[in-house]
Image (tube, rainbow, N blue to C red):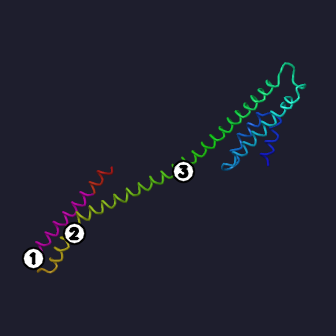
Amino acid sequence: ALLLLQILLSAPLESNLSVVTVLTIPLVIPNQRWWRWSLATVGVVVLFQVGRNAWQIFLPAQLPPGISQRELLLALLAGALEIIAWHAFALLAAVLILRIAEDRQRLLRLNYEMQGAQLFLEESSRLAERLRISRELHDSLGHHLTSLNLQLEVAGHLPDAEIRPKLAQAQYLAKLLLADIRSSVSDWQAEHP
């Protein structure tokens, strides 16, 4: 209702005011319905502005001195084309404003999506690194732990005199195990300073 009132008030006052109206139409009317409002506004303004002087074409006695009907008709057409051009310019400016706003929203949404993807990739990278470390530790330490466990189990079933070599072997395996752990940790620290 306010838009219609603005259109009707701007048409008789000055066509330049209706340019502002056409500029605001796409900004306030959603979807593609604003095309109809814009065309209606331009139509109302052209009809009113041209209609103010068009009656003189049909009443030759009312023509200003030195102006023919043809000249008046050409002046009216030029005025109508000027009105249409300014309104088209305003409409294109409004459409550009809308496109810029839509593009800005789309860029913000894409930026948020990219940030989410970046966080996901960082987390995936951390999980992959943890998995790699756990596999490396399992591969390098599993064999030594199994041997150590077997040596200790065998030592538990032997008489006291035979226990010493088995315990020495178990101690050697424990040292190898510690060396492997230290090597894995220092390799990891070198890769991740």
Cα distance between the residues tagged 2 and 1: 21 Å
Does residue 171 belong to the magenta stretch?
Answer: yes
- Dot placed on the residue nearer the N-terminal end, 2 or 3: 3
User: Which picture quadrant has residue 88?
Assistant: top right
Label 3: how many Cα within 10 Å (few below 14, some 14–19, many 20+)? few
Q: Which residue is mark 2?
A: 145
Helix, strand or loop at disc 3? helix
- Residue type, numbered disc 3: Arg
Dominant secondary structure of the magenta stretch?
Answer: helix
> Would you say the residues marked 2 and 3 are in contact, meaning their CB atoms lie under 8 Å apart?
no
- Residue type, numbered disc 2: Leu
Question: Which sits in the foreground, 28 or 187?
Answer: 28
Residue interval drawn in magenta: 163-184
Q: Residue at x 83, y 31 (%)?
A: 54
Q: Residue at x 30, y 60 (%)?
A: 133
Image coords of residue 49 (percent x, y): 81, 33
Question: Which sits in the foreground, 83 or 175?
Answer: 83
